[in-house]
Image (cartoon, grey):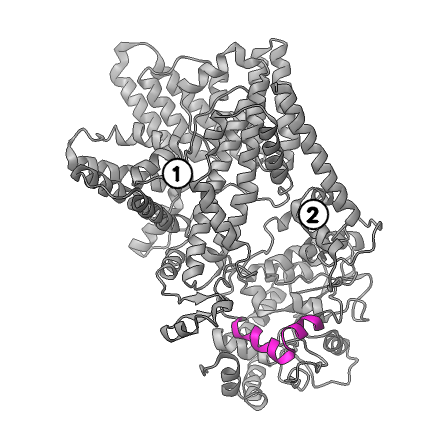
């Protein structure tokens, strides 16, 4: 064979095969990026590219209000709730750090319509194992060419799995929130709520840092949080910061590995940080509400029977849309649970944290919990 | 611009290739060289245009010094030596300023308990490589081993984009005749085929193999707090494989790209993990760096000509310099020190005439290299200690859950079941374990890309192999990842 023929074969075959793969990916559209409606497959692999999809949707929707946070926010907060000014979008991303949330926030801000932000802060956002979950995350905000994804083996795998289907259905709604009931299948698979909780809590906080850094890059995380707050002041955006309504078992899991004091101190540090920036801008402190409190809603009884469903929680970390709705109702002052959630300021924070410690022992038997989850006591 | 990016493969490369040969076909040789320099500088500036003046300044400076050294004037012999020393010191100072100032300040602060602020300088891309290449040029000029060329030719030699960023580190005398050769200015389809073949293999090695191992190495080194025995070994092996496939993949791509322009770059890897002793390893790993260190550090220090004790000292010094060239940190110094010590031991061992089985020699060599890479990779001492502690079982031993029935008795010895790779792999090792096995098979049994290049034949088999590697590579491009050696 001569060289020219060899080169022709290589180039033509490469273009042909790549084109064919691109065509499959385009027609199947496993993440719903291209709006091709040739087939009606459930987008079971959409969650693999959710960060990218949310960036694209943000640009498309140009939301007036958003909520930020981790998967807890994705599960719990419905952007169609009257709390949000429309158009609105749930821009929280699973396992995200404050760095990622800051980039998401700035991107939404750059779209020009943003007026209101609900930031559901999680301890892990400021102490995440990774600064970003996807290596090219930043490129999502640089008018990324979504057609690049057509020519990808990973996408081809997802296209084939989408065709294959299975019992998974799409887990996201168009507004960025997780589908309200999909998680039940996972809970059942793990043996019900109680078994899922025990399993998750056993290792949840095992590897998290406590010094407000991203573990992989060792970079400080508070500057990312403070940038969000600062930009909100500078752009007259209404920012509500809340500590989410996870189940109280979650804080015991945190206590086991990281220490209860660290957990309380973190809330205070968030408050101090917001006040510092408020003072710099001569403005009032943004609303900060603590829903990570001891209350019958967050201390919901966990059924040991596999098939019994909880009303408000999936496991101790994630809560359902029903509880998220109560939180949003409380934020607009339209809820029967007037004792749920405490608005924090520099005057009441110490008293509030002290009260939490007192309530803790009223609501949960720490020793019993630790034996149940970890098999030993380490208070 | 990365070799493994759409903009490089589909825009920069074809445009540069066609314009370069078009200008040559019109006999516009100077214009074609000028265009190649311009393209290479554009390629370089794609990352950050702020680095451009640094490389331009460095090039101009070294060209002037090199030309003066090259002038055949015996009367200024003494001043030539001074000029050479001045040139070398200036190059080292430039590298030192950008690469080692913060390291120096950190240690100064530590020793004197002072609080001098770090400069936080960004390391200009490729500075370690183009500095070493130009130091070699100065020494070669001093030794009258370089012919005189004009600045344009010199600029082609330094900036030629296939080898600009991370080598291979080339000599003036092996490159310039190739650029000057008229026959190399015409498209050569055999070279294009060879170039495509080796570039495709390199791309596949980088984006499919190395980037797959990278995930486990990163999880183990950077994210996990503790690692059990299996996790720690999987972490260190993943990095060992990642580094080899990453860097040799880059080199293959560089060799392939240069071949498109009818330029032959020296080989940089020759199945290094098949080495059966540490000296053998350094003859196979990053060959052009080893060549540089030997010719411009080890031999000028006296090499093995000044007695056994001095030889050992020279070996150790050369490898410590090699270590710190890779990065400003004690972990790199220690890595270089370990390799230096290993070479000293190997030399003493060989002198005594001891011999061991080949498989045992390989096992010892590979494990040493694997363990030494832990310090090379670790961002901080603690990370290295974490991985090594795990490798000796201090992080506990966990076995896969399905073995719990058959091997339940092991629990009395503290062995746990379940979570055996949980800290580095979410899917329980389903891809990790076969990948590690495949990694060993490739490094030990497969022919390396240089051998494949030498035995290359134009047939359907090689065409199909190239297509598969190219498609596998291109269809994995949407995960952007830089080459490890860009950081050094």
Looking at the rendered structure, which numbered label has been put on residue B272?
1
Secondary structure state at the residue bearing disc 2: helix
Do callouts 1 and 2 mark residues in contact (Cβ within 8 Å)? no
Tell me residue B425's x, y (percent): 53, 59
The local crowd at label 1, few if under 14, some if 14 to 19, many if 20 or more residues have their Cα within 10 Å, is many
Give the quarter of the figure containing the C terminus of chain B: top left
Is residue B334 rendered to the left or right of residue B121? Answer: left
| Residue extent of the magenta highlight | A184-203
The residue drawn where x is 72% and y is 77% is A323
Q: Is mark 1 on a helix, strand or loop?
A: helix
Left or right of B257: which side holds B393? Answer: left
The alpha-carbon separation of the residues under discs 1 and 2 comes to 34 Å
| Residue B148 locus on image (x, y percent) | 41, 12
| Closer-to-camera residue (B417/A276) | B417
Q: Mark 2 points at which residue?
A: A156
Magenta span contains residue A202: yes
Chain letter of disc 2? Answer: A
Label 1: chain?
B
Circle 2 crowding by C-alpha within 10 Å: few under 14, some 14–19, many from 20: many
User: Which residue appears at 78% of the width and 49% of the height?
Assistant: A28
Any part of residue B123 in sight: no
């Amino acid at each position: 064979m001569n060289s020219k023929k060899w080169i022709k074969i290589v180039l033509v075959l490469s273009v042909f095969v790549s084109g064919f793969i691109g065509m499959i990916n385009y027609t199947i559209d496993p993440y719903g990026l291209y709006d091709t409606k040739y087939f009606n497959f459930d987008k079971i692999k959409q969650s693999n590219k959710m960060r990218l999809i949310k960036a694209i949707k943000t640009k498309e929707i140009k939301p007036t209000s958003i909520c930020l946070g981790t998967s807890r926010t994705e599960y719990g907060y419905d952007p169609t709730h009257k709390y949000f000014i429309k158009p609105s979008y749930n821009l929280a991303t699973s396992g995200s750090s404050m760095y990622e949330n800051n980039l998401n926030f700035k991107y939404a801000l750059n779209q020009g319509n943003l007026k209101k932000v609900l930031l559901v802060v999680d301890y892990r956002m400021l102490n995440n194992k990774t600064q970003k979950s996807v290596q090219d995350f930043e490129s999502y905000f640089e008018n990324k060419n979504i057609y690049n994804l057509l020519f990808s083996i990973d996408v081809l795998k997802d296209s084939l799995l989408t065709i294959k289907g299975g019992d998974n259905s799409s887990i996201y709604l168009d507004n960025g929130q997780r589908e309200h009931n999909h998680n039940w299948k996972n809970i059942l698979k793990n043996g019900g709520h109680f078994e899922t909780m025990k399993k998750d809590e056993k290792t949840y906080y095992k590897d998290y840092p406590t010094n407000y850094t991203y573990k992989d890059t060792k970079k400080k995380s508070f500057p990312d949080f403070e940038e969000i707050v600062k930009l909100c002041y500078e752009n007259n955006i209404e920012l509500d910061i809340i500590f989410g309504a996870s189940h109280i078992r979650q804080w015991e899991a945190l206590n086991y590995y990281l220490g209860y004091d660290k957990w309380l101190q973190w809330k205070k540090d968030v408050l101090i940080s917001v006040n510092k920036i408020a003072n710099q801008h001569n403005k009032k402190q943004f609303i900060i509400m603590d829903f990570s409190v001891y209350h019958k809603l967050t201390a919901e009884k966990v059924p040991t029977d596999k098939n019994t469903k909880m009303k408000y929680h999936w496991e101790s970390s994630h809560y359902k849309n029903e509880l998220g709705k109560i939180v949003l109702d409380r934020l607009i002052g339209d809820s029967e649970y007037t004792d749920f959630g405490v608005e924090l300021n520099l005057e009441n924070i110490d008293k509030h944290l002290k009260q939490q410690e007192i309530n803790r022992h009223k609501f949960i038997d720490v020793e019993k919990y630790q034996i149940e989850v970890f098999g030993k006591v380490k208070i | 611009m990365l070799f493994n990016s759409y903009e490089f493969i589909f825009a920069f490369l074809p445009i540069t290739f066609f314009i370069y040969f078009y200008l040559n076909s019109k006999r516009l040789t100077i214009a074609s060289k000028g265009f190649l320099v311009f393209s290479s500088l554009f390629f370089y500036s794609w990352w950050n245009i702020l680095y451009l003046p640094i490389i331009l300044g460095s090039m101009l400076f070294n060209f002037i010094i090199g030309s003066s050294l090259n002038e055949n004037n015996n009367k200024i012999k003494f001043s030539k030596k001074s000029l050479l020393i001045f040139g070398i010191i200036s190059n080292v100072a430039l590298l030192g300023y950008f690469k080692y100032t913060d390291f120096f300040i950190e240690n100064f602060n530590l020793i004197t308990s002072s609080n001098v602020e770090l400069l936080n300088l960004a390391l200009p891309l490729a500075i370690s490589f183009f500095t070493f290449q130009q130091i070699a040029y100065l020494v070669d000029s001093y030794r009258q081993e370089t012919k005189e060329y004009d600045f344009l030719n010199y600029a082609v030699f330094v900036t030629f984009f296939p080898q600009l960023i991370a080598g291979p580190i080339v000599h003036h005398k092996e490159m310039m005749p190739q650029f000057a050769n008229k026959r190399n200015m015409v498209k050569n389809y055999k070279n294009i085929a060879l170039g495509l073949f080796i570039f495709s293999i390199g791309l596949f090695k980088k984006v499919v193999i190395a980037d797959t191992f990278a995930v486990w190495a990163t999880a183990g080194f950077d994210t996990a707090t503790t690692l059990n025995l299996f996790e720690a070994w999987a972490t260190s092996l993943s990095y060992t494989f990642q580094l080899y496939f990453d860097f040799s993949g880059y080199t293959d791509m560089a060799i392939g790209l240069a071949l498109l322009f009818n330029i032959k770059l020296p080989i940089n890897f020759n199945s290094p993990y098949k080495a059966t002793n540490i000296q053998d390893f350094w003859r196979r790993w990053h060959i052009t760096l080893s060549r540089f260190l030997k010719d411009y550090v080890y031999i000028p220090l006296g090499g093995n000509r000044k007695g056994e004790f001095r030889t050992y000292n020279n070996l150790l010094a050369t490898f410590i310099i090699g270590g710190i060239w890779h990065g400003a940190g004690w972990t790199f110094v220690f890595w270089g020190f370990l390799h230096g010590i290993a070479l000293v031991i190997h030399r003493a061992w060989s002198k005594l005439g001891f011999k061991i089985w080949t498989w045992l020699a390989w096992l010892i060599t590979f494990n040493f290299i694997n363990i030494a890479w832990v310090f090379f990779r670790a961002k901080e001492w603690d990370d290295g200690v974490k991985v090594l502690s795990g490798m000796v079982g201090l992080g506990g031993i966990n076995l896969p859950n399905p073995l719990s029935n058959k091997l339940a008795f092991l629990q009395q010895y503290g062995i746990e079941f379940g979570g055996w790779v949980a800290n580095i792999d979410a899917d329980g090792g389903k891809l990790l374990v076969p990948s590690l096995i495949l990694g060993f098979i490739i490094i030990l049994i497969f022919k390396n890309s240089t051998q494949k290049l030498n035995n290359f034949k134009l047939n359907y088999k090689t065409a199909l192999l190239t297509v598969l590697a190219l498609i596998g590579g291109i269809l994995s491009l949407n995960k952007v990842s830089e080459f490890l050696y860009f950081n050094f």
